[in-house]
Amino acid sequence: MKTPDAFDGEQLLSGALDPDDAPKELKELAGLIRVARAPVQGTSPAVDQAFVASIANEVRRSAQLGPVASPTYLARIRRLPSGRVAVATTALMLTGGLAAAAATGSLPVPVQRAVSHGLSHLGISLPDPQSSNGARAAGNATSVATGSAKTKNTTGTIGLCKAYLYQSGTNGLRSTRNTATVSERARLGKIASGQNETVLAYCQGLVDQAGRGLPGASGVARTKGPSHSSTTSQGSIASGKVRHSSNSNQGANTSRSPKTPATPNAKQSNVTTNATGRSSAYKAASPIPSRHAKRVRTKRRTTKAPTSSTPVKSTPRSASTSLSTSIDRGKGVSTVQTTL
Amino acid sequence: MDESKIDEALEAARGGAEWAIAVLFQSIQPDLLRFLSYRARDVADDLASETWLAIAQRLPGFSGSISEFRALLFTIARRRVVDHYRKQGRRATSVPLGEANDARSSDDVAEHVIEAIVSQQAIDRLVERLPESQAEVIILRVVAGLSSDEVAKVTGRSPGAVRVLQHRALARLLKEFSPKM
């Protein structure tokens, strides 16, 4: 059986092929298609005119209205079941972040206290800034041996003070935590005013106290672990002092310890450059061998330095930056000593 | 009707010109009504009106050729048919001849009824032995008067797939309606 070619097919389907002119095998099919294409009885012309007018009105009306305003993105998301899930998930993540902050004791004191107290009824134990348990819980992270709340508070305050002193260019301090936020500075101001001191005087006193290893400064008690780790322990600015002296006496030790004072000021105040706040407390707790610890500290410092806020006096920062750079380039101890 | 005149009418119809819409209506309405009459004879006029009103809302923002306009119009019409039968819980099929006869015989001129019945019968004969996909292509091509490309747009198939379906349908029809030796 012959199949219709494209030309015949198009002619057939469009009704253009007259059955009288069609080949014999296509005559019946062409006739059927012709009949099938016959116009259906139409509506009356009067109705058509009215209908056409109504269509024209509708076109003009739609043109004036313009495109339909779509609802806002959030409104559309809320309408979707999946959108509700997304909103709930976001809320859950925010709540989770709050919980994580509460678990590490990183929330502001009143909030931490409220969260800790509230969740204690549910059998969930979180660090409480007012209780010894809380101090111990927080102390686990900073390896604080003494369990007093004052110790924890002082520890945090020392870190803030160092950041504050570094930021203000005072005392030649260099901290891995270079900045104190506005709220932290306000907190320091509150504490200092409670002691009838200026922030600067209060912080210098506190840091000096810590440097002497007084118990109130909390540094000494936290220096656990191998002896070399004391050179990296945070609060123990006093340990920095010891290390500094060892630096001057032992070249080998110095070569393993690039954490030397960044500025002459640091030397004068007998404070090591790695005397930091909370982050150095982590160093004291971590059993990282000193060489590895140095590498970690170096990386941390070099990544932190560009993000630090501009200090009031640029000298300490520039000195520390040059120190970090020379260490990063692997120039060794001699370079460090030359810089100093 | 002159193709250029229809293109010109389409351009003017976007602004709501009544004469232009009348030209489009006279050009397309017979095919639309034939298509709808085959699919849902009882409500063909209503569905045609709904289709034109729906296309009127899209006309101001429409930018395409007359072929695309026809494809869009028949796409809307096809959906209206589906919606109509969905509401009634029935599947869209052609109207039985007897039912068509009853619907028209009471108030129409006898000649039109006979034409309609004959036309309907012819369509039924054309597609009754075709698979559904091929039957749809033949109906859109013969009854609605669409081109292959327009059928592709209406049915959501590629033009090549439409041509293959059309070729197979014609081969089958030729086999059926050619004189037996």
Image (cartoon, rainbow, N blue to C red):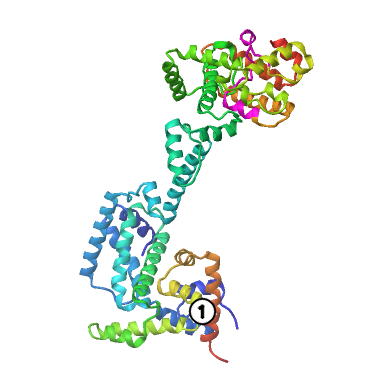
Residue A328 percent location from the top left of the image: 70, 22
- Residue in view at x 36 percent, y 60 percent: B6
The quarter of the image holding the C terminus of chain B is bottom right
Q: In this image, B104 relative to B125: left or right?
A: left
Is residue B179 or residue A47 the one in the foreground?
A47
Image vertical order of residue A180 relative to residue A62, above or below: above
Please tell me whether residue A146 is drawn above or below residue A165 in the rendered image. Answer: below
Q: On the picture, is A340 further left or further right than A216?
A: right
Quarter occupied by residue A16: bottom left
Q: Residue at x 55, y 76 (%)?
A: B168
In the image, farthest residue toward the right: A252
- On what subunit does the disc labeled 1 rest? B
Work out whether residue A143 or residue A131 is closer to the camera in this orientation and state it.
A131
Q: Position of residue A50 (x, y in %)?
A: 21, 65
Q: Nearer the viewer, residue A226 or A298?
A: A226
- Identify the image quadrant of the N terminus of chain B: bottom left
Image side of residue A148 versus residue B85, left or right: right
Residue at figure coordinates x 43%, y 49% from the top left: A88
Q: Position of residue A184 (x, y in %)?
A: 47, 24
- Is A165 situated above or below A137? above
Near-viewer residue (A225 or A159): A225
First to last magenta residue range? A260-284
Q: Is residue A278 magenta?
A: yes
Query: Disc 1 residue type?
Result: Pro
Q: Is residue A137 magenta?
A: no
Crowding around mark 1 (Cα neighbors within 10 Å: few <14, some 14 to 19, many 20+) is few
Q: Position of residue A157 (x, y in %)?
A: 51, 22
Task: Name the residue carrying label 1.
Answer: B131
Note whether residue B18 is visible.
no
Q: Secondary structure at mark 1?
A: loop
